[in-house]
Image (cartoon, rainbow, N blue to C red):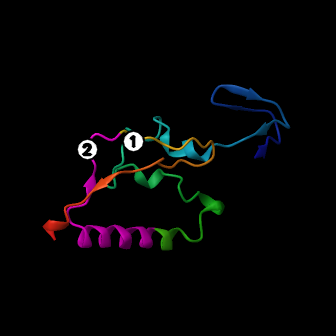
Amino acid sequence: MRTTTEPVALGGVDLPKGARLALLFASANHDEAYFSDPARFDLRREDAKGHLAFGRGIHFCAGAHLARLEGRVALELLINRLPGLRLARGQEIMFAVNPIHRGLKELHLDWDAAGR
């Protein structure tokens, strides 16, 4: 939650001093004004450096570097240990209903164990 300290206009909406705001962090990286095709998952996205997953400025996450390293190690292990791992065909990607955080409701994967 945030409270405006003076009158301000955000996104074309005038807000008076003292207005209470509920910030929806789940939408932060989905603004088409900043990110091309924001709903597409792309690890090599050219505009990825502008994302807000770890905050910004004085609010930048102290554990961001560790989280990135953990993510890279986890993905490398999955790729190396389960080379046939892939998204299951025909599934509908659905997100859990949550106004604060964005996450998948479920994710189905297929794996060819014989290909090991």
Residue 31, percent from left and from top: 50, 38
Q: Name the residue under label 1.
A: 93
Q: What stretch is highlighted in magenta?
A: 68-91
At mark 1, the secondary structure is: loop
Residue type indicated by callout 2: Arg
Residue 16, percent from left and from top: 82, 31
Looking at the rendering, which quadrant does residue 92 occupy?
Answer: top left
Q: Residues within 10 Å of mark 1 (few under 14, many from 20)?
A: few
Decide if residue 63 is on the left or right side of residue 4.
left
**Which residue is situated farthest in the right direction here?**
18
Does 100 appear above or below 77? above
Closer-to-camera residue (73/68): 73
Looking at the rendering, which quadrant does residue 21 occupy?
Answer: top right
Q: How crowded is mark 2: few (under 14 residues within 10 Å), some or many (20 or more)?
A: few
| Residue shown at 49% from the left, 69% from the top | 67
Q: Name the residue under label 2.
A: 89
Residue 69 counted in the magenta span = yes
At mark 2, the secondary structure is: loop
